[in-house]
Image (cartoon, coloured by chain):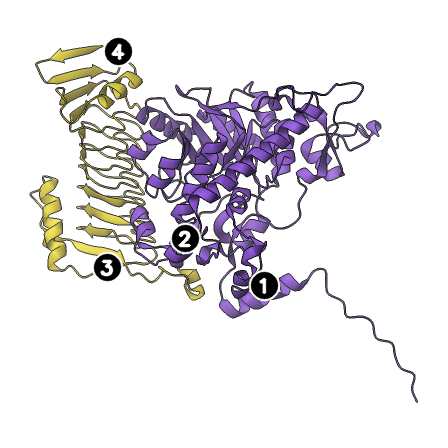
Chain colours: A yellow, B purple
Amino acid sequence: MQQLIGDLMRTFDLAQSPLRELNEELHRQTDGSNQPQWEIVNPRGGHAIAVGLDAPVKVDIRGSVGYYCAGMNKKASVTVHGSAGPGVAENMMSGRVVIKGDASQYAGATGRGGLLVIEGNASSRCGISMKGIDIVVKGNIGHMSAFMAQSGHLVVLGDAGDALGDSIYEAQLFVRGKVKSLGADCIEKEMRPEHQEALTKLLADAGIKDAKASEFRRYGSARKLYNFNIDNADAY
Amino acid sequence: MSPKIPLTTPRHSATFDDYTLSEIRRAASTGIYDIRGGGAKRRVPHFDDLLFLGASVSRYPLEGYRERCSTSVTLGTRFAKKPIELKIPITIAGMSFGALSANAKEALGRGASIAGTSTTTGDGGMTPEERGQSKTLVYQYLPSRYGMNPDDLRKADAIEVVVGQGAKPGGGGMLLGQKISDRVAEMRNLPKGIDQRSACRHPDWTGPDDLEIKILEIREITDWQKPIYVKVGGTRPYYDVALAVKAGADVIVLDGMQGGTAATQEVFIENVGLPTLACIRPAVQALQDLGMHRKVQLIVSGGIRNGADVAKALALGADAVAIGMAALVALGDNDPALDAEYAKLGTKAGCYDDWHEGRDPAGITTQDPELSKRLDPVRAGRRLANYLKVMTLEVQTIARAAGHNNIHNLEPEDLCALTIEAAAMARVPLAGTSWIPGVTGSGGL
């Protein structure tokens, strides 16, 4: 059941119509779409909502979602007015995904671009294997976050759990609060002007006004495990 | 003058044989485990231990050059809107750009397309050369997610969620610095020259219940059009296949321990996983128990070398097979014509497996531009097509001799085993008896 509300906003009720119909409709949208605004009601914790989008549409989801919401997003702006289950915005390419509540495990996993903003807390493995995505978490993040993170930025206004940045490659991590422990090959690094500048822009992009770049510490790779050496075997 | 005491002849230890001793010396010298490509080199029960019975008085054969024997197979009939139609049941297994040169990937695409079958990407994403030359391309969805993107997902003809592979079930990939060229590094978002480890498990799901949701997500992204395969290494085939079916797979790819890898630890390749022969019947049993045999298709890989191997895999219940190592040899890998160059690398033709070093004189397992140029993708593709066609003819020859007008009608009753081990694994009678160890009582003797 879909209703046309006004000229631009379209509402899709997941209590009335199946997920497959919703995603197929969203996939039909193109760069010049005349349906640029979508509202999804009654998500009821469903999985794979608004995945594979490839057009500059704005999608508001009224409620909490299950696994992989906004997975592989390109160009679209998706806002979850609730909390998100595991793997939100996994492998995102571009666009913007905002979670008003908390996010479960693997938020932004393997993401290659775009901005993911989590206004609550993120669970373990936030930004795992990230490949260019920018992630901003207003609350805390769980253990093993940014595991094997390759590139992109992870900004945390709260605290980080155990083993932050384990086996990290070239991603940059900024944490304002405490870090419980750093993972293998992850070290605190100097915050140079270019990092301050990048962080300031990320905070602005995420709409955060009550935090300054100077309050954060930067973490990244010591690059000691980039090539095999038997004497490093106990690092793992 | 004391009598001369006769000396015993020098004797090698069966336990500490030459290879074992050389490995101890290598480890002591380098301080790192041995890494190599390929699959298990040890002798394990295999298709060679099975024979076809052929037709006789009780069954009659089909004429070799006159009566049709169909070879086509459709994959992905369970959920996908667009299943894959292949002319032959022999597919090309996943091998990465990175492990292989761009020319080698293109040659695989060309050969497979001429022969009417599919090829598969690998742990390095999809290259335009490969997509362009592959009529039917399976896109692997791997734990590393290197190069993964929704555009390529939509360009693919099928998607293969890789849980594991036979050479290293439970292990991740490894691409050493020598092969991380600018192009490979860019496709994988990695610094050039590092030793790159591919993850051993997926970053955003664990276990069969999550896999079901992951498959749902991929189906939703691709509007339920593409067949979704699940690839597993041979470990616990009955349960792995049952769980993959439950998770919603259209096709299961089951890879035994002779299946190759681009590079992993020798100790892993030789000591973890099941022989291909031991995998097939438990997998088929799982499909039959669920009422899904032939509805969810089974592709078997790991040590397939000729039409007889294909026919035996099909007779045991597979719908198709996949080849990797054999396809590389068809392109020109390990060719004796290059023996002088292999000697310079401390090896010889037929034994070369240091693919991770990127110095392949055949230009196949390398990223070196000069070496890569040695492989002409058109000519190599033609060689692969020839080889695929020969194998298909061989399967038909055996199927007709067993009285079948479709190679998928081959069945376990067409087979017997030469050894008790093979009889037990393949669940076919020991030759000349009706004894299937583990299935029938010894009264069959």
Amino acid type of the residue tagged 3 in the rendering: Glu
User: CA separation, marks 2 and 1?
Assistant: 30 Å
Q: Mark 1 points at which residue?
A: B23
Quarter of the image with the C terminus of chain A is bottom left
Mark 1 chain? B
Kindly identify the residue that appears in the image at 38 percent across and 46 percent down. Answer: B102
Q: Name the residue under label 4.
A: A16
Amino acid type of the residue tagged 2 in the rendering: Ser
Residue A224 x %, y % = 33, 63
Q: Name the residue under label 3.
A: A188
Q: Specify the quadrant of the image occupied by residue A104.
A: top left
Label 4: how many Cα within 10 Å (few below 14, some 14–19, many 20+): few
Ranked by sequence position, the earlier of labels 2 and 1 is: 1
User: CA separation, marks 4 and 3?
Assistant: 51 Å
User: CA separation, marks 2 and 3?
Assistant: 42 Å
- Given contact means CB atoms under 8 Å apart, are the residues at marks 4 and 3 in contact? no
Q: Name the residue under label 2.
A: B372
Q: Specify the quadrant of the image occupied by residue B428.
A: top right
